[in-house]
Amino acid sequence: MSAPLRVAAIGGFHVGGRPHRVEGAPTRVAAFAPGGPARPFDPNGDYVAGQMYVQYVRLADPATPVPLLLWHGGGMTGVTWEDTPDGRPGWHDFFLRAGRDVYVSDATERGRASWFPYPGVMPGEPVLRPLQEMWDTFRIGPTEGYPLRRPHPGQQFPIAAFEGLARQIVPRWPGNEAATSRAYAALLDRLGPADVVAHSQGCGFAIAAAQGGPARVRRLVLLEPSGAPDHAGIDLALAARVPHLVVWGDFFGASPVWRQYRAAFERYADALRAAGGRVDVIDLPALGITGNSHLLMMDRNGDAVAALVAEWLTSGQLANPPAPL
Amino acid sequence: MSAPLRVAAIGGFHVGGRPHRVEGAPTRVAAFAPGGPARPFDPNGDYVAGQMYVQYVRLADPATPVPLLLWHGGGMTGVTWEDTPDGRPGWHDFFLRAGRDVYVSDATERGRASWFPYPGVMPGEPVLRPLQEMWDTFRIGPTEGYPLRRPHPGQQFPIAAFEGLARQIVPRWPGNEAATSRAYAALLDRLGPADVVAHSQGCGFAIAAAQGGPARVRRLVLLEPSGAPDHAGIDLALAARVPHLVVWGDFFGASPVWRQYRAAFERYADALRAAGGRVDVIDLPALGITGNSHLLMMDRNGDAVAALVAEWLTSGQLANPPAPL
């Protein structure tokens, strides 16, 4: 049993979004409560669309006043950072106990951020990941291992709770990235400078946010970024003043898509270094830490990975070489 | 500045839901990360649908081991209980500071519970409330007062933050109530007996849950229930052993729909009393507490209403007569 956290405040808010008006849509009739009367519902009117949701836990005595922002990946929500699918405390708990004020978001279009069901706002139809797709994309195991849940050898993801992961997944809209980036920018306008720890698709938004420089992002941790923008045409002067750390798990040999994503990120990292920036790298297998999936924070050794990240966030640099676990 | 909360654990989990398989759907091609390669996405496969999300804050020294569950209304999420649209702490904060372990849920189909975007699971098309509909249904003001935001006289809802309310609203599916009720039952299987505070549409699920008797629900608070089931054919023997409290705000004279909902609830309450049950009533205007909208927990006097509810939850009965505020 850990010592109690001394918490100053827990709460949530929405940020960003734009007014949107619906006109000329037909009225529906529906019962909105069991046992209640059916009544007309007119969807025409005023809305806000594109906002995102943020939940905060602020400590009574944080180790630093700089807030720590946890940004989830594609098709996921802030739940990524909470209890793991097999019920262990997650990185939200880890960083609170490490003394950080933590802000967890649900990016635009997912979770408590909401989404827009009438035409004209979202780009086309959403997709939801089936378990088979996650098995492959999250590098849990070989494709043919799915039916009997036979993972890659030494897999750190808790396989017995793989169905629990399915409960966390939410629909996503490919092509909606600009709206999401706007909402993250509004969040950093409100909270920055902040430390940002991003995962997968969230890294793309974090890389974009870091173009605002140290006034927005103090230090940036990218967990398994799913690529990076083409640096041609981007002025990296401000981003080069933000220390970056990238963390890679295992099993890249089994995933051509992930080798493409990683190569795209490495091109971006090289450009950032050429502009005078620093991009530290934690390649877990190279440190002898093997078996990590794409979902580092849910893996059985997730706390050990979090400890490496926390050390970097505190000191601003890698131990050289990092101590083996 | 309030004293720090001593928190033992903060986390979240999903509960309920059923396996679901998609077959025969076409493959799509999409880029799933900015700068990443377009790749085929095959939606065929295994899913879980109908689960709900629950977030908990457990205190180091709770006043009672009985958990307090906060169940939101239709088109909303657990955000209902967090910071109000004008940025004041909400009922989540209030009940934590009152010493309760609090569990806030996002019911099936909304927020972090997720929803299912392919055919065959959700019942038809969702609806999202425009501001005009909320203005009427939440009894903020007369219909003709919307354009200039002229509310009912003495309105307690923070009108200047009305657009903030729009950011909290999520799509809902009329007709999906059975799936939601199953998930709430799974939640009470896991956590009960619990105290439940429900709002609006959430009251319908809470009334259904109370049919399980005191093994599931110790005490039940219904904030502005949007109706109630027809009691004919329901055996109320177990529900009659669960003390009920109902709380009503102001401005029913302006809303024929709400008079219908209230009458339906009163028929149910009479049946429960006839079966030996107790249904206490806090009619706020009758106590001289005027101006409350349907969104009691967001109103400017929300803490005063919470204090009445907290007193009833602690003592299991109303002060007789309740002390005026």
Image: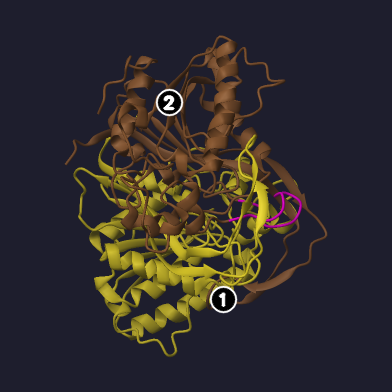
Chain colours: A yellow, B brown
Q: Is residue B88 left or right of residue B279?
A: left
Query: Do the residues indicated by labels 2 and 1 lie within the same chain of the protein?
Result: yes
Quarter assignment of residue A311? bottom left
Tell me the residue that label 1 is attached to: B36
Residue at the far right in the pictured view: B24
Tell me the residue that label 2 is attached to: B67
Residue at left 60%, top 47%?
B109
How dense is the environment of label 2, judged by Cα within 10 Å: few (below 14), some, or many (20 and up)?
A: many
Q: Position of residue B56 (x, y in %)?
A: 42, 36
Specify start and end residues of the magenta stretch as a single range: B115-127
Residue at left 34%, top 73%?
A210
Q: Main secondary structure of the magenta part?
A: loop
Quadrant (top left/top right/bottom left/bottom right) for the N terminus of chain A: top left
How dense is the environment of label 1, judged by Cα within 10 Å: few (below 14), some, or many (20 and up)?
A: many
Q: Position of residue A323 (x, y in %)?
A: 34, 55
Q: Secondary structure at mark 1?
A: loop
